[in-house]
Image: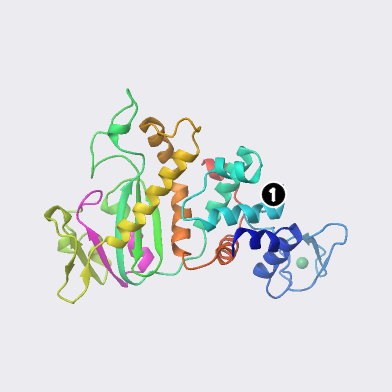
Amino acid sequence: MDLTAFASTYGTDEACRAHMESLRWPGGPVCPGCGSVNNAVPVSTKPGRWRCRACNRQFNVLLGTALEGTHLPLRVWYLAMYLMLSTAKPISAMSLHRQLGIQYRTCWHLLHRLRAMLASGEKLPLSGIIEADGTYVGGKPENLPKGAPRPGKRGRGTTKPMLFAAIERGGEARTVAVPSASVAAIAPAPWGWTRGAATLMTDELGAYRWPDAERQSGIGRKMEAYHRVNHSQREYARTTPGGLRAHVNTAEGFFSLFKRGIFGIATASLPRRHHQVSPKHLHRYVRRTSPFDAAGHEFRYNGRKHDATERIACCLIGRHGRLRLRELFA
Ligand SMILES: [Zn+2]
């Protein structure tokens, strides 16, 4: 669905609300007080509000979602979701501010709520062949501003947080930000995402060079099978004895898209005369935005075969429970 069609279908608060009600309440309004289904009447003076016949409580479709208590019109939320979910790159608060004509601060908060909605949806286990890889967030040490403290180590042993991802070949991706690149911090993620019922593939370079992996005491321990490719020995793909192709090209593609997205943001959010993003700003920007953008990137990647309205539906039904400002800053 293109923007014109989307704007004419979801151009009014009533249309958006009807869409949301049909998603959340396929069997009629559900009272959050007593749980009665389809036993409520509309409150004539307040559009969108229902009154439960059983317990007399009044409620609307936003109650219990991340949109609860919002002062923004629902059609603005829908437009923001469309803009956020229909492009390959993450959208910045500044860009949303320009396109929607609402305050930057409001856009910033709106984006955080949406990203939290995306991150919290229910996810099915990955299976088959899983490629895992990680990248440090926070830029490279040589890009730090003059006088900033340098990280003591590079590669394994650095204190920078890591974004770790596992991608099912031909399927979905899962990401998590971990505080360090130790086996203890990383390994539980793929075990949990796959429940162990999958073949894991990684490279041996970079962040997570766990020395005992080959002896099945590292990340591969709880997996059905585990294969490593040795990029340092210029081995990028090989055929395993079982006839599988061992490589991590899918994971590398996922990360290169993610990094391109961040660079896109950094450029777009700076004043026009600063087309050349200075490394000083870049590292700060990457560090500040990565954990949340990862959720958006994962969601867009997983929904790449869906159209914008299907992605909005996934986004809306994934999250229950309002996200408050202090949760964002915690
Ligand atoms: Zn009730």
Q: State which quadrant residue 216 falls in.
A: bottom left
Q: Is residue 306 magenta?
A: no
Screen quadrant of the N terminus: bottom right
Taking the spot 34% from the left edge, 39% from the top edge, the residue there is 139
Residue in the foreground of this view, choosing between 259 and 141: 259
Residue found farthest to the top: 147
Q: Quadrant of ligand 1?
A: bottom right
Taking the spot 32% from the left edge, 40% from the top edge, the residue there is 160
Residue found farthest to the right: 45
Residue in the foreground of this view, choosing between 55 and 150: 150
Image coordinates for residue 104, horizontal then vertical, percent: 61, 38
- Amino acid type, mark 1: Thr
Q: State which quadrant residue 199 falls in.
A: bottom left
Q: What segment carries the magenta color? A: 188-209
Please, is residue 144 above or below residue 185 in the view?
above
Image coordinates for residue 303, horizontal then vertical, percent: 48, 64
Image coordinates for residue 222, horizontal then vertical, percent: 27, 67
- Where disc 1 sits, the SS reads loop
**According to the image, label 1 marks what residue?**
70
Image coordinates for residue 244, horizontal then vertical, percent: 21, 73
Please state the total of marks drawn on the protein image.
1
Q: State which quadrant residue 170 falls in.
A: bottom left
